């Protein structure tokens, strides 16, 4: 009988704590193999500092339910790139010493790309020193850029926040008779999944997203302005979602380039004020003379639990539980990933992937999901992404406040 | 038997369409006095352009329910200051000619301060020409700055969006071991009700709002920095909500002043990038060396139906219905306002106010609701505002999309 230790790492999401709830409940569920359930605060950094707390209180009634609707990393996080276990043994010796002290047999790290690298290195080191500690990752990232897995927990809820922002902003923007342009800036530095998900805002009765600008497509200011102009002429208001990571045809981020862009295109010479959304806003206002507004969702998009996708919340929980099941089966250096069985009705199964095949690879939107002009997504994308945003969890509020799991340490 | 015409005016809110639903259902409910129910598109401007549509389709099942969860002005809006009926008769002659053409006996305008001015002028003109058209206003504004009425429909839902943003952002910001400052910029140019409502994010287990900066309190950069510094030293991360309308002790908006502020205070000389939130961010980062982030909620805060307050949605609907009842009782130039009976349990009644007493007066936060240091609110504010944010409406989603009432014209 060994104990379980779970940490969270990387940027927060709306459902990373649902995966944590899955790991905790999985730990409790395997009482034949797993003794105590511990959490490490602030990722692997906190483990190094021996910030380890008991999570046994989650056996009490409502707490796990509250944890599932608590956004961001309940246990805290870090952004630490582990050294190579071949080169720097000292770090791993320290970590494994602490694991031994707490009699840990099962180690879980819930995180994105970098965290999968942590899982990889930890599991390799364990193997090297013939430790029987099983190291399993649980994927999360709003960016949806992990390789192999069909999609990643956290993406569906962030996509849902973006799509419903677009829908509500569309309603907001069409109230006056003056045409206007709204530009929403979404996260995603190298992959445009989140910005693309703005297109999920459209339905048969409402066009709430007209243009998406993705990092996968080289940004050309002239072509962009032509596109905005033609949509504005056709229908008045224009709804745009831009990824923070768009680049020009030389691969330079538009923000780095902004001066060049403005000199070239802005006939009124207005000063740029903010991020890429502001840059596009200035382009549109300065060159087309249209009323334009840029909205940066900032961190709200990654911590918005109060509009989460039930599919995402449930899958995140299931992935956590499955990770524990894998570890109990003796697997190590693996990650529960999603394998899609069908789009309609949506069906998915969880399978173990080798963490080495997932770590450090970025998955971008394939060309077949992007329209030929580069400013939209194809039906293939919609079919892929739609189910991930569906369903609404029952949320617990008190006094108008979304309720969260209190600290148990 | 006369017909009903309703328009919407001013900026959108999450529940202005709930008031519209109230007026429409009130119209249907008074079938002894009211014939057809019409809507005027784009406010009084649209009436002038004879953009008048039938709303009879709302007799069909689900539509009114969907309208209640549709943000922003379903009928469109305008920002038009009406001329004085004593000075410019032509405008009113045209409008009343159109009302006559559609056999309107009941005219409703749902809107904020300026719209109450419209109601005032329309009702005075009607009286002057001895028209029996009853003109009744229905109040709305996220700013909560209308006089006389205890509060205004639209405020509770915007306040709830802000408080739950603060709560979720607090979770997001406390994940790392590095202290950081989050500054949320809320609307409210002259009254700080919305920024103050960030304080509703706090509860016994969580401090999600540490500092509010209100237009009611002269902004002093040195005192602000001292306050941020002391909170940061005490607890690490600092959560701030700032009203877009804060001013210095000479009454100048901080944004106008920004150059002075920066010369005086920023020892690193960083350039300001955006609105007042960015200015405070630069102040904090530049002078205290803290990691800081500014988030501008922009129009999201006024159109966020998917996290609305049930109290707000219901009261907005009731106000709409009551307006129709008043008109049917023969009242004109009035507005249904809210009179608070008790805080706990919250009890309110709707009473008619003379529109002239409401129009063109701005209600600010009284001193008794602001803490002596000016950076917080007192229990009096919490007791006042909390009930307005309570309750969650059951929302209809399909395919992950919040559903809206389709256009019926």
Image (cartoon, coloured by chain):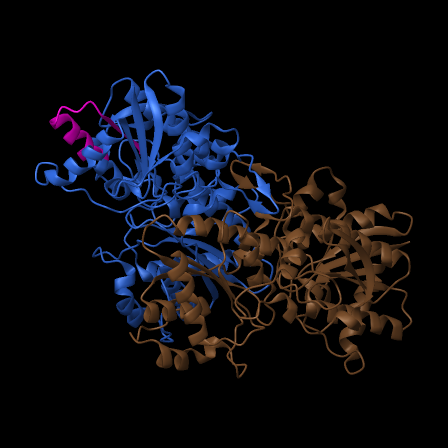
Chain colours: A brown, B blue
Where is residue B73? Give x, y as percent. Answer: 38, 42
B152 vs B320, nearest the viewer: B320
User: Can residue A62 be seen?
Assistant: yes
Can residue A98 be found in the magenta stretch? no
Where is residue A304? Give x, y as percent. Answer: 56, 51
Can residue B137 be found in the magenta stretch? yes
For the record, the magenta segment spans: B119-138
Lateral position of residue A86 relative to residue B109, left or right: right
Q: Residue at x 13, y 23 (%)?
A: B130
Q: Quadrant of residue A117?
A: bottom right
Q: Residue at x 23, y 58 (%)?
A: B252
A193 vs B209, nearest the viewer: A193
B141 vs A330, nearest the viewer: B141
A308 vs B75, nearest the viewer: B75
Where is residue A348? Give x, y as percent. Answer: 77, 53
Lateral position of residue B72 relative to residue B88, left or right: right
Q: Is residue A275 above or below residue B194?
A: below
Query: Which residue lies most toward the left here?
Result: B87
Q: Is residue A185 above or below residue A271?
A: above
User: Can residue B363 be seen?
Assistant: no
């Amino acid at each position: 009988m060994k104990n379980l230790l779970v940490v969270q790492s990387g940027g927060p999401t709306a459902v990373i704590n649902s995966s944590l709830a899955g790991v905790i409940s999985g730990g409790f569920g395997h009482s034949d193999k797993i003794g105590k359930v511990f959490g490490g605060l602030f990722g692997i950094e906190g483990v190094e500092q021996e910030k380890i707390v008991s999570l046994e209180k989650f056996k009490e009634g409502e707490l796990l339910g509250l944890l599932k609707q608590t956004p961001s990393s309940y246990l805290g996080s870090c952004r630490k790139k582990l050294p190579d276990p071949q080169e720097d043994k000292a770090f791993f010796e320290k970590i494994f010493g602490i694991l031994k002290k707490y009699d840990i047999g099962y180690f879980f790290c819930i995180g994105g790309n970098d965290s999968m690298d942590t899982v990889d290195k930890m599991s390799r080191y364990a193997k090297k020193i013939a430790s029987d500690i099983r190291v399993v990752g649980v994927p999360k990232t709003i960016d949806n850029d992990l390789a192999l897995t069909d999609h990643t927990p956290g993406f569906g809820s962030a996509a849902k926040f973006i799509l419903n922002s677009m829908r509500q902003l569309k309603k907001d923007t069409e109230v006056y008779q003056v045409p206007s342009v709204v530009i929403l800036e979404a996260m995603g530095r190298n992959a445009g999944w989140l910005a693309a998900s703005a297109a999920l805002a459209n339905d048969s009765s409402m066009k709430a997203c007209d243009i998406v600008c993705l990092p996968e497509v080289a940004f050309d200011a002239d072509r962009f302005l032509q596109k905005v102009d033609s949509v504005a002429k056709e229908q008045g208001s224009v709804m745009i979602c831009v990824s923070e990571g768009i680049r020009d045809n030389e691969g330079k981020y538009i923000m780095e380039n902004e001066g060049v862009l403005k000199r070239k295109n802005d006939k009124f010479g207005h000063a740029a004020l903010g991020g890429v959304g502001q840059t596009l806003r200035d382009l549109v206002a300065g060159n087309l003379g249209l009323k334009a507004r840029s909205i940066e969702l900032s961190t709200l998009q990654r911590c918005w639990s109060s509009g989460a996708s039930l599919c995402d919340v449930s899958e995140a929980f299931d992935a956590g539980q499955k990770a524990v099941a894998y570890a109990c089966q003796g697997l190590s250096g693996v990650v529960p990933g999603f394998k899609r069985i069908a789009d309609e009705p949506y069906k998915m199964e969880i399978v173990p992937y080798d963490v080495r095949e997932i770590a450090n690879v970025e998955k971008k939107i394939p060309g077949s999901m992007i329209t030929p002009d580069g400013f939209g997504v194809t039906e293939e994308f919609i079919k892929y992404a739609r189910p991930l945003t569906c369903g609404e969890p029952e949320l617990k509020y008190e006094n108008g406040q979304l309720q969260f799991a209190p600290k148990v340490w």
